[in-house]
Amino acid sequence: MSMDVERARFNMVEQQIRPWDVLDTRVLDLLHKVKREDFVPPAYKALAFADLEIPIGLGEKMLAPKLEARILQELGITPQDRILEVGTGSGYMTALLASQGAHVYSVEIVDAFLPAAGERLSQHGLRNVTLENGDAARGWDQHGPYDVIVLTGSVPVLADAFAQSLNSGGRLFAVVGEAPVMDARLITCAAPGAFSTVSLFETCVPALRNAPQRAQFSF
C-alpha cells in the first residue's frame, strides 16, 4: 500500500504539477515530504492525489494540487517570512507554508475546521503556526505587517487592506474575479505604498465566505 501511495504522489508531481510550469525543486521536494493524504477527509483518501478540488465538509473544498504548488512557487517563500493565510481549511496549504516560512498566521471563518487542522499540523511537527477563528476576507492586520499573504479562496473584489499589510518586499497571492473566469494575481510591495501587480494565469476557485462584492449599479 505504501508503494502505491508513493507512486501516486510521484505521478501527481510529474503528471500534474511539473506540466503546470512548477519546476522549483524546493517546492517539488516539499510535495513529497508533506503527506497530502494526511490532510484529506477519510472518505476521499483515494482521491488525495487527483487533479481536483476535494470536499472537506460544510461546502468547502481543498485547492487542486497543481494550484497549491504554483502558489508556493510564485511566492518564493524564505525561512524568514511571516505569513498570513486566509482560509485554513484542511490545514494542508498551512503545512506547506509553515514548512518554508518562519511563522504562519492562518485565519479560518469556519470554526469547526480548526481542531482537526491543528491536530494534523501537530502530527507533522509544525509548531510555527497560529490558527485563529475569524473573518479575514477584507484583511487581517492583527499580526502584520506580513512578508507573504495567501488567500486560499477567490474574491470578486480584492480589499486594499491586504496590500497595505505587506512589508516592503512582501508578496500577496489572490484569485480575483467571478466564475467562470478569474485572475490569479501576484502583488508585490516595492516600498511603502508602492505596489506592482502581475496577472499569472486564469483559473476558477470557490470564493471566500463573506468576500467583498462588486458594487451593483442600477439604472
Image (tube, rainbow, N blue to C red):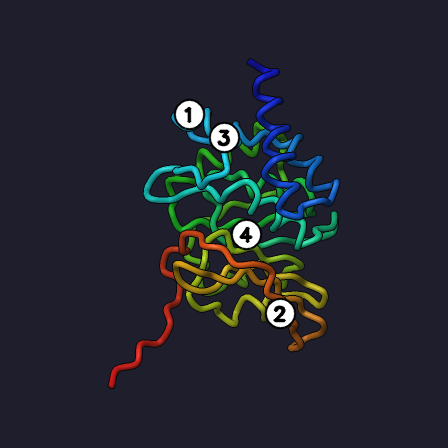
Tell me the residue that label 4 is attached to.
Answer: 85
The alpha-carbon separation of the residues under discs 2 and 3 comes to 32 Å
Q: Earlier in the sequence, mark 1 or mark 2?
A: 1
Tell me the residue that label 1 is attached to.
Answer: 42
For residue 187, side relative to residue 136 (left or right) = right
For residue 170, side relative to residue 142 (left or right) = right
The alpha-carbon separation of the residues under discs 1 and 2 comes to 39 Å
Check contact, mark 3 vs mark 1: CB within 8 A: no
Q: In this orientation, which residue lies closer to the viewer: 67 or 128?
A: 67
From the image, state whether disc 2 or disc 4 is nearer to you: 2
The alpha-carbon separation of the residues under discs 3 and 4 comes to 22 Å
**Horizontal and vertical percent for residue 13?**
63, 35
The alpha-carbon separation of the residues under discs 3 and 1 comes to 10 Å
The alpha-carbon separation of the residues under discs 4 and 1 comes to 24 Å
The answer to which quarter of the image holds residue 150 is: bottom right
Which residue occupies 57% across, 63% down?
Answer: 185
Which residue occupies 56% across, 34% down?
Answer: 121
**Horizontal and vertical percent for residue 137?**
44, 60
Tell me the residue that label 2 is attached to.
Answer: 197
